[in-house]
């Protein structure tokens, strides 16, 4: 019981609270490739914590059984991307927003690191276009609406990120095209 420090031969170190010789409570765990500061239970990450890895990822959120689970935000300083939302087993799972450095962002329901579902997914592109609709495996698949920067609007089915099937396109000057893509 109490606080203490353990240094291992490989350079790994734990500094924090202990319970019967096991990491428990608040502590800091450092390896050659990562650092975690947060809560522990029975020797595993559990509760709120921050984890930084040598590849530029910083996660600030909740852990369960040693894995990212619950609400959290992960930013990558090397790529500039970020995800904020729900996690399960170290992957985005549930409602969340993914942002890219070019200004694109995608809001929706995530399943194993991919936007997926019949619920509404919003994808804003840095070029000004906006997609609203269904997704599957991270691609626009199902009914959707694409609003282009110039004001033109496509309504209809999409498949693998492309317009596909019977739909309509209304240009910004009011011209309507109905047909098959």
Image (spheres, rainbow, N blue to C red):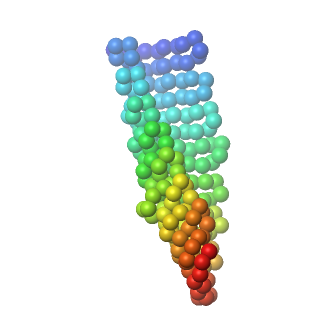
Q: Is residue 140 visible?
A: yes
Front residue (pair 172, 181) = 181
Q: Position of residue 139 (x, y in %)?
A: 56, 58
Relative side of 73 to 170, left or right: left
Q: Position of residue 147 (x, y in %)?
A: 57, 73
Above or below, 83 relative to 22: below
At 51% from the left and 54% from the top, the residue drawn is 115
Quadrant showing the N terminus: top left
At 52% from the left and 51% from the top, the residue drawn is 114
At 56% from the left and 67% from the top, the residue drawn is 158
Q: Is residue 151 visible?
A: no
Which residue appears farthest toward the top when viewing the image?
A: 9
At 34% from the left and 13% from the top, the residue drawn is 20
Front residue (pair 127, 6) = 127
Q: Position of residue 178 (x, y in %)?
A: 57, 83
Q: Position of residue 23 (x, y in %)?
A: 40, 20
Quadrant showing the C terminus: bottom right
Front residue (pair 147, 143) = 143
| Number of numbered markers | 0
Above or below, 8 relative to 29: above
- Which quadrant of the figure has residue 44? top left
């Amino acid at each position: 019981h109490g606080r203490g420090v353990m240094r291992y031969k490989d350079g790994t170190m734990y500094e924090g609270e202990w319970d019967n010789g096991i990491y428990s409570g608040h502590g800091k765990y450092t390896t050659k490739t990562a650092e975690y500061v947060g809560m522990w239970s029975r020797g595993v990450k559990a509760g709120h914590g921050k984890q930084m890895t040598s590849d530029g990822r910083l996660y600030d959120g909740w852990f369960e059984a040693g894995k990212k689970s619950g609400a959290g935000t992960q930013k990558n300083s090397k790529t500039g991307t970020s995800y904020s939302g729900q996690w399960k087993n170290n992957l985005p799972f549930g409602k969340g927003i993914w942002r890219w450095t070019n200004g694109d962002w995608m809001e929706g329901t995530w399943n194993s690191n991919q936007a997926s579902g019949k619920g509404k997914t919003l994808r804003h592109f840095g070029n000004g276009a906006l997609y609203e609709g269904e997704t599957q495996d991270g691609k626009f698949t199902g009914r959707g609406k694409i609003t282009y920067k110039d004001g033109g609007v496509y309504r209809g089915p999409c498949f693998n990120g492309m317009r596909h099937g019977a739909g309509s396109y209304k240009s910004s000057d009011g011209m309507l095209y109905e047909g098959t893509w």
